[in-house]
Amino acid sequence: MASYTYPVARPEGTLTTAQIHLLLQSPQLIAKRVADLTKMRFIADYLLSGRYEAKGGGIFYETGEEIFAADSPEAVAPGGEYPKTVLTQGELAAAKTVKWGLESDITDEKISQQGISIVNKALVRLSNSVVRHVDSVAMAVIASKVSSTFASPSAWTTAGKVIEALTSISTTRGEDGTGIELDTVVLKPTQYAKLIGLLVDDKALPREQGNIAITGNIPVDALGFTWATTPHYLGSDPLLVDRDQLGGVADEKLGSPGYASVAGSGVETKSDRHRDDKYEVRARRVVVPVVTEPLAGVKITGTTL
């Protein structure tokens, strides 16, 4: 993808009114600005790592598909034929995409009075609203599909007890022969804060530059697991998942004229000049999150976080 720059490489506050109008008339510049300004990122894309292309308003997918072949490998003599196995299929399911969108007006008066700041505020608020809603939908789908639970052997009061519980459930699930590797813990923000404080007190966080206590970066890797948080997870218990197998997100590309997006952003934007001395600015995502393997997640009870 081409690299786009803004009209003038100077401080934001010095952009002229004419330059702001030029920016609002460029779909690619708007998309680039949204990618640069948006601080919230889709937890849906992080936890549901599969990428599908929806066509005709939805997708068909298989759920509960076996990760292993039905037969075991056999010894093959030099030049001999390989044994053939029939790969089993999961249960066929369908999901329909939804166009989640929002629009707001930026008047010429606001541009004249507030400059580029009013544009930034509008784009960030619209984009973050789309992120919030899509993430809420995705977390609701995950919560409804992941029904298995695991009781922690003890309350999470030390790093040792935390790793005991996580290792226990990961080992148990691994012994089931499903090929699932539970390695990512999802927490509500309040639980995440308690957990990080616990790890800091126990000196269980890595000392390198990626230390969450120093950088504030999320997610963080500690105790052999990845820790993530989102305000859109409403469950009361920590969620442990295998991000590679849990599911995916299907986006539908409508090909609508005037819309643009930047790779990795997920949000499509559009800016239309209206006859009433204003711009109509939109943000949207046409998407459906799906859980293809419910066993790739488990809710952990009894942590007291």
Image (tube, grey):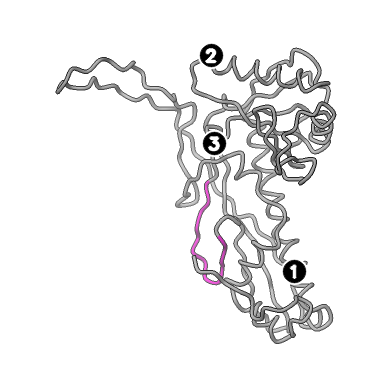
Residue 138: x percent and y percent? 64, 41
Could you tell me residue 216's position as x and y percent?
77, 45
Provide the residue designation for mark 3: 247
Disc 1 is placed on an element classified as: helix
Residue 91 x/y as whole percent: 45, 28
Q: Report how far apart the C-alphas of labels 1 and 2 lie in the structure.
A: 51 Å
Secondary structure under tag 2 reads helix
Q: Quadrant of the C terminus?
A: top right
Mark sitting earlier along the chain (3/2): 2
Q: Which residue occupies the foreground of this view, 55 or 168?
A: 168
Q: Of the residues under marks 1 and 3, which one precedes in the sequence?
A: 1
Q: What residue type is labelled 3?
A: Gly
Quarter occupied by residue 101 = bottom right
> Which contiguous range is marked in magenta?
250-262
Residue depth check, mark 3 versus mark 2: number of the one nearer the observer: 2
Secondary structure of the residue carrying tag 3 is strand
Q: Which residue position is annotated with label 2?
A: 175
From the viewer's side, name the closer residue of 48 and 251: 48
- Residue, x 69% and y 40% (percent of image)? 219
Instruction: Please identify the quarter of the rendering in which residue 207 is found.
Output: top right
Residues tagged 1 and 2 counted as in contact (Cβ below 8 A): no
Real-space Cα distance between discs 1 and 3? Answer: 33 Å
